[in-house]
Image (spheres, rainbow, N blue to C red):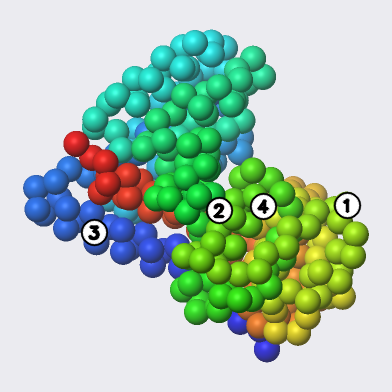
Amino acid sequence: MYSLIDGKATAATIKAEIAERVEEIVKNGGRRPHLVAILVGHDGGSETYVKNKVLACEACGFKSTLIRYEDDITEEELLKKVDELNHDDSVDGFIVQLPLPKHIDEQRINEAIDWKKDVDGFTPVNVGRMSLGLPSFVSATPKGILELLLRYNIPTSGKKCVILGRSNIVGKPMAQLMMQKQWGDSTVVVCHSHSPQLKEETRSADIIIAAIGRPDFVTADMVKPGATVIDVGTTRVPDASRKNGFRLNGDVKFDEVAPLCGFITPVPGGVGPMTICMLMTNTLQAYEQFAK
């Protein structure tokens, strides 16, 4: 019988721990950690995501600020605001919600963010520091996965970990972290949709982290009995039975894979809640390390 990894409950526990730490800081005369989110335009997914970040800040006892711009803002105006936040000592961390309008160079904006306030962990400086094993802000989804493995006492040292997907946000940083001694200490194989012998690789894996963006990609014949399967996929699949007309579908064919597993994350309720939670953890880290 498999064990379900409950990301929602774990995230709630971590947020309660953060809130306790924040109240201790305030009690001792400190200010509340402050997270700022910049939202450009009216993308539905981004609106929901930012709203959830604001709610998470409230749960953790943080101060949060939402800065909104219409999608006709110029790149220079946005860069000016980024620079302003970089030099604002009352702000511990900030995020620029993606995607941005097509006329704005996302990479240029990203590179303008001070790495000490980059609580998303996306700037080249943080990515480079993370890959070298230096203190850094680790991007939220990979960090959330590591936290789940830790809190569920799932052994990673010396284990074979197969990562499906090579994105800059999940696949690449996940591989770096799982191979590093102070994090996963695992033997890591990175596969993607064009990898030969893909099933042979996954069938020998102790841990599979699926972040390939294809619904039901991982099937029972790809998983060895007792493996841990972490499903990062969140594809919207049409579903007429739902009020909103869709459901979130993971990269793993859950009903057929789960009976084989030792541990498995559901979608939704697995990795997703941990992502915003780790943004809160990074904000607290920024406050405690760099606050003036």
| Mark positioned earlier in the residue sequence (3 or 2) | 3
Q: Amino acid at mark 4?
A: Gly
Picture layout, residue 153 above or below residue 182: below
Which residue appears at 37% of the width and 36% of the height?
117
**Mark in front: 3 vs 1:** 1
Crowding around mark 3 (Cα neighbors within 10 Å: few <14, some 14 to 19, many 20+) is some
List x then y, in percent, for residue 182.
47, 65
- Of helix, strand and loop, which one carries label 1? loop
* Most distant residue in the bottom direction: 1
Which residue corresponds to mark 2? Answer: 141
Circles 3, 4 touching at the beta carbon (< 8 Å): no
Label 2 or label 4, whichever lies nearer to me, is 4
**Amino acid of disc 3:** Arg
Judged left or right of residue 102, residue 92 is left
Helix, strand or loop status at disc 4: helix
Foreground residue among 21 and 16: 21
Q: Cα distance, mark 3 to mark 4?
A: 31 Å
Q: Nearer the viewer, residue 68 or 74?
A: 74
Q: Which residue is mark 1?
A: 194
Give the spatial CA distance, label 3 vs label 2: 22 Å
Q: How many neighbours does mark 4 have within 10 angstroms: few (below 14), some (14-19), or many (20 or more)?
A: many
Taking depth in this image into account, of 169 and 133 the one nearest to the observer is: 133
Image check: 186 left or right of 79? right
User: In this figure, which residue is indicated by the disc labeled 3?
Assistant: 21
Residue occupying image coordinates x 51% and y 27%: 111
